[in-house]
Structures are given as C-alpha cells and as structure tokens.
Amino acid sequence: MENIASIFVKSIFVDNMIFAYFLGMCSYLAVSKNVKTSLGLGAAVIFVLGITLPVNYLLENYFLKEGALKWISPELASLDLSYLAFILFIAVIAAITQLVEMVVEKFSPSLYASLGIFLPLIAVNCAIMGGSLFMQQREFGNIGEATSYAVGSGVGWMLAIVGLAAIREKMEYSDVHAPLRGLGITFITVALMGIAFMCFSGLKI
Amino acid sequence: MSKLFSEKTKQVFLGPLSKNNPITVQVLGICSALAVTAKLEPALVMGLSVTIIVAFANVIISLLRNTIPNRIRIIVQLVVVAALVTIVSEILKAFAYDVSVQLSVYIGLIITNCILMGRLEAFAMGNKPWESFVDGLGNGFGYAWILVVVAFFRELLGSGSLFGFKVIPQSLYEAGYSNNGLMILPPMALVLVACIIWVHRSKNKELQE
C-alpha cells in the first residue's frame, strides 16, 4: 500500500510526463490556449491512461514477456513475444479510446460534450503510449502499482497543462518580441516550468 | 528524370526544410525532438530513423489510400507505422545496441510521433506514392536537422565534446572554463528550440504570429 502511494506521488512530481520526459508535447502545446479546454484534455488523459495502462500491463505479463505464456502450457514458457509489444500496445490504445468514446457518448452525453473532441486526439498522444512503454521498462510488481503509476502520470500531465494554460492566458497581454510571439515564448515558458519542477528531482519517497 | 523531379516535387521536398518545417512551423513531433538531443549520436540516429519511417509509411499509405475505409483509417495508419517502427527498433538492437539503449522508449514513441500521423493524414492520403515518398524524406530531414543543431549545441556546451570526442582543449579548462551543466538538463532543449524558432521567424516575417 505504501509503495502504491509513493509511486503515485513520484509519478506526479518527480517523473512528470511533461517536464521530465517531454511526452505528449504536441497536444500540450496545441491545446493549452485556455484553462477550460486544457482541464478537459487533462481529464481525458487521466481517464485513458488509467484504463489502457493496466490492460497493457496484463498483456505484457500474461502474453508478451519471456515465459509469460506459461499459464497456457509449460511448453510455451520459452516463447518471447516482446517484439510484438509496439503493435499490440498501440492497437489496445486505439481500440480502447474508440470504445471509451462510444461508451461515454451513449451513457453520459454531457461528459461527451466536454471530452468528446479530445478522445480521438488522445490515441496518438505520446503520453499514453509512453506510459505503457515505461511500464514495460520499470517492471511493476502488480497491477495496483501499474494503475497508480498510470493515474499519477495523468494527474501530473493535467497539472502541467493547466499551469501552462493559466500562464498563457496572462501572457496574451504582454509585449513579446514579434518573432518570438506565440510558439517561441511558449517553449521558453515550458522550459522555466521544467526547471522549477526539477527541484523535485532529488526527492526520495 | 525530368518527370521525377518536377517543380512540384522539388517544392514538396524543400518546403519542410524551412518554410514548412515540421518542428518550428507545424509544431509536430516535439516530444522526441527534445528528449534525445543531449548528445549528437542518438539525435542523428533518431533523425535518420524517423526519416526512413516517414518516407516508407507515406509510400505504403499512399498505395493503400483508395482502399482504406475512412472510419478506420487511423487504426490502419497506426498499424503500418507500428510495423515499420518494430523493424527499425529490432535493426537498431542488432547493429547499434548502445544507441538503442540510449534512445530507450523514444524509438517506440516514433509510432505516436505526430509528424507521422500528420503527414499520413495531410499528404499520403491524397497524393501519389512517389510524391508521398519525397514528402516523407523532406519532412524527415526537416526534423533531423533541427535535432542535429540542438544536439550540437547541447553536447558542445554541456559536455565539451562532439560525437563523444573532446573538442574543447584541456588548456581552456585549466584557464578556468567549465562545462555548462545546465545544457545537459532537459529544459535547455526547449530554450534552444525556442532560439531556432526566434531566428527562423525573424528571417521569415510571414510566419510570425
């Protein structure tokens, strides 16, 4: 239990998806123009990460890893299917986003109205795929840890995008040098936020 | 030959190198561009891998463009890209293991690199295979050169070396010069890209926002 909590906090602050690994930058820069939409996208990322990562965790441990197929028959124990990881992970992510989109549309039209447009975008958000690949690399002990990592990373991503959106809303009124206006100054803002987040990097939890 | 390199194809190839650069203008594929640029070697390998994958994915999707049902096109594109990325990743593991370890998850993340999806959606779905191939090469190189420039400055100023060889003479260190540790940290990649954008947009006034 302690481990789950520490993984959660760590994935929000120390291993922040944006500031430590630059994952999901494209939508991060494109959709951070105002706080309200960025909240919506952040919520959608938490949602999709929290569903796809545990599914990919099960896939990795009961299907792909070397010796993972033991539960079918002992003869398959030597099989290593990890080279299929990329294709299967992305297929799972694309399928689940599609599924989530349909379910949300059917059962909660109001949620769909606020999240709907972002869901297809999320299939190609690097943060989702990155989460699964990091999960593969870090070899979490059980599905609880994997889920807490997923939700934590999502929360960290949301924190980052809402923060940037708030700063950009204020920055509308500042007088930035013309060639740097828009994209350039946003990059520098993200860099400064990243440096600020580095104060967490020595943290041992 | 004249047919292969018509005026339009040339435009398709040269556009992404500057006026329509995938990173500084289209803002695609930023994630990997920032994460792999602490050293020149991984940046170069990453640039080449992306170029190869974009070019071939563009050709494949362009050949299939009339048979792909519209509703499932994103999944088809993802599967084609994922297959190509798997091939490249296995080749790197076999022939350049050190680099593939340094690139870690970022090779896998080429699948979700927005340059790929962007080019497949915007170009390959509506153009012939040869033009799509050229477009892929152009965008790949446009991406690669930004990576190499950023990596050049980060490695030179951060570690005092290029491709792992020391280039800043020892006497300079003795005179009191020291490496700028800040350049190694990930946020500096953002600042360098911002500087490239700054220079680029000062030269091309029509790109300014």
Image: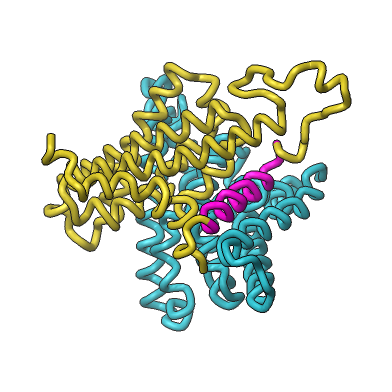
A45 horizontally vs A203: left or right = left
Residue A72, above or below A4: above
Q: Nearer the viewer, residue A179 or A123?
A: A179
Please give the name of the residue rendered at 46% of the width and 25% of the height, measured from the top-left corner: A67
Magenta span contains residue B187:
yes
Q: Is residue A5 visible?
A: no
Is B116 magenta? The answer is: no
Image vertical order of residue A83 relative to residue B25, above or below: above
Q: Residue at x 42, y 49 (%)?
A: B18
Hue used for the chain lettered A: cyan
Q: Which chain is yellow?
A: B
User: Toward which corner of the image does residue A169 lie, by quadrant?
Assistant: bottom right
* Residue A53 location (% of width, % of height): 51, 50
- Give x and y (percent) for residue A166: 67, 73
Q: Residue at x 44, y 43 (%)?
A: B143
Start and end of the magenta stretch?
B184-202
